[in-house]
Amino acid sequence: MVILDGVEKRFGVRLVVSAITLTVPARASIALLGPSGCGKSTLLRLILGLLVPDRGRVSVAGTLVTPDTATRVRRQIGYVIQDGGLFPHLTARENVTLLARHLRWEKPRLEARAAELAGLVRLDAAALGRYPAELSGGERQRVGIMRALMLDPPVLLLDEPMGALDPMVRARLQRDLKRIFAELEKTVILVTHSLDEAAYLGDEVVLMRDGHIVQRGTMRDLERSDDAFTREFVDAQRGTQPSTQPAAQREPSGGASAGPDA
């Protein structure tokens, strides 16, 4: 569904994404994980066509992403950012239906789809009439998810969607997202700093560093890795002292894939 083939991107002299090749199958959920500045969010912008790669190619659902095709490609992608990214002068309902109204959907269809999505994300229908400043952080994020799903796109990109939420709200939203991913069978690429969130929401995890992919696999693969950076990253997330033992001599931590429901 999403293919990056030898993709490279520079900002000035800084190489942000370096020769990355990544294939994401249809209906798979992939979590991009890594420290700040490693290129995770840049990859999402390249997929969306918001950035043009200096080298390599990006395709979505068989369409090569270029400046000429970017608008058409974006209509096949739902995009969710931290705190929802809502327009403050529009109500929640107006935010959700913005693109559909631009595409001249008829009012009954708009209202039916908005009501369906509110039920899907468990948002009180009364909240749709409020402005973003009148919503809680969790409500804004649910509205952002509704907006991303409005046109029923096959691909969903989420860039740190829960980074600004308190732990309890975050845990509830994680559970709802996992249910939504399973129910809708979208192709999902999630950017996160959290190892536990990546394990809970991703079928696979892609660990990045300095614009490169260090490792791709399950959480168990990361925990048992012989790569020094991977071990350091996992240990830092777990709050443990760095391990000096080879992977073959270390016991897996157990429960690495446990999510908020565990």
Image: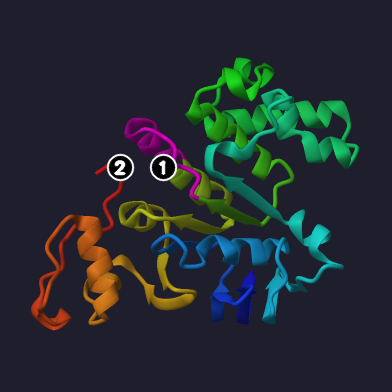
Q: Nearer the viewer, residue 36 or 201?
A: 36
Left or right of 11 on screen, residue 255: left
Kindly identify the residue that appears in the image at 34 percent across and 58 percent down: 199
x, y (%) of residue 153?
70, 52
x, y (%) of residue 245?
10, 79
Q: Quadrant of residue 225?
A: bottom left
Q: Nearer the viewer, residue 49 or 171?
A: 49
Classify the position of the N terminus by image quarter.
bottom right
Query: Which label sits on residue 174?
Result: 1
Kindly identify the residue that appears in the image at 39 percent across and 55 percent down: 193
Left or right of 227 on screen, residue 210: right
The residue lying furthest to the front in this view is 13
- What is the three-letter code of the residue carrying label 2? Pro
Q: Which range is magenta? A: 160-176
Kindly identify the residue that appears in the image at 56 percent across and 20 percent down: 124
Q: Are marks 1 and 2 in contact (CB under 8 Å)?
A: yes
Reading the image, the residue beneath label 2 is 260
